[in-house]
Amino acid sequence: MKKEMALITENFLRYGPPDTAGYLEIGGFTGLEKALAGSPEELVRTIEASGLRGRGGAAYPTGKKMRQSAAYEGDTKYLICNADEGEPGTFKDRELLEKDPLGVLEGMVIAAHGVGATQGILYLREEYSHLLGLLEDSLAAMRQDGYLGRGILGGPLDFDITVFVGAGAYICGEGTSLIESIEGKPGRPRNKPPYTKAQGLFMKPTLVSNVETFSGITAIVRHGAEVFTGYGTPMSPGTKLISLCGNVNRPGTYEVPFGTTLEEIVMGIGEGVAGGRALKFVQIGGISGPLLPKEFLKMPLSYEAFEKEGLSIGSGAVLVVDETTDILDFLDAVAAFFKHESCGKCTPCREGNRQIMNILKRMREGVALPSDPENIQRIANTMKYASFCGLGKTAPTALLSAVRYCPEEIFTRRGL
């Protein structure tokens, strides 16, 4: 029943970073060598052929994103690795940075060749600042061995990477908020357009991608797009890193091919619900993801399966929740998180989370108003469609999915 595998994670703990010699012995930098032996156009076509999508949550086709970025010329072009992994329940990017940092950094250099970037920045979550020394040592080793800096591997590519440590704001996981943070401003989202590919950091063309995305680029170029597409489904090729956590016997970071069912993840890889208790629901994609009751265990982890339900895989977190959890308590914790992390720029997000918490409080205390069920859904939908950025748009996802799939437990049993 288990479907664990190792493609993106193949080098986990197989060398001691920042040891570039050990990384070379297990095939490290072969992807970069292959990429630099060909043209940027050939590299972009390889990523397009792989079907790789962004692994940060938006799932935008990576090859398409690289092609669009490559079209913008300039003396200075930035490439940013978004390591601001602030989604509660998500920790797979931390594992990549801890156990295979050179694989992530190699992917950044490969991508820089494809899009013509001149400067790279790894934006590190403040809570991951303990990794700063490891990353800076890895970058220094790469510079010393000719994998970073001027004339990489004796060719025309000039590209270097620095690490920028954030200040702990969840909103900075959003690409334009992250850019504002690097520029020394409060982390608040920008208007779009202009898009970052045209005017990003310091108004220069900028490509922003996730840690897992860059690791995926390394694996694809190293092994070939055909190896990557040999896993997964036709519409969702390749593999996905999942952060399995909550009331489960075997939590951790696992790599699975797309198409693996939630049952295979929770009951197989995770070895079932902890303590032998019954499963109440799983939350997919972190705290901003949907709640799916046990009836969804046969659902495959694939873009097409989730899109059919109007849902998103998000970051790939799988949070297991057992029967002892009250769903209203859970939803209140979600709303409290987003209320705290909202930047306050737009009214739907700033006020919506506060109003949702007020209604949930009345429902939990048994003093709900007859209009509360309608109002809480109206507020949640207003946030979903009218919020300025992805934080506000996805903040009510857990609530809306709970109303959709578990109305009895939320309303009927409470006399609403």
Image (cartoon, rainbow, N blue to C red):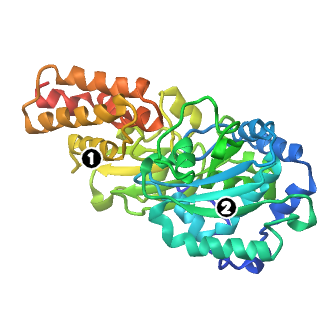
User: Could you say whether the residue bearing mark 2 is in a helix, strand or loop?
Assistant: helix
Residue 222, percent from left and from top: 80, 59
Badge 2 amino acid: Val
> Is 281 in front, or is 203?
203
Q: Are marks 1 and 2 in contact (CB under 8 Å)?
A: no
Q: Which residue is mark 2?
A: 104
User: Could you say whether the residue bearing mark 1 is in a helix, strand or loop?
Assistant: helix
Q: Residues within 10 Å of mark 1 (few under 14, many from 20)?
A: some
Q: Quadrant of residue 15?
A: bottom right
Q: On the picture, is 22 further left or further right than 299?
A: right
Badge 1 amino acid: Ala
1 or 2: tag closer to the N-terminus: 2
Q: Please name the residue shown 58% across and 42% down the image.
A: 259
Q: Quadrant of residue 53?
A: top right
Q: Which residue is mark 1?
A: 333
Specify whether residue 20 is in view: yes
Query: Is residue 70 depicted above or below 124 in this figure?
Result: above
Tell me the tag on residue 279. Answer: none
What whole-number distance in Å separates the C-alpha atoms at marks 1 and 2? 33 Å
Q: Quadrant of residue 61?
A: top right
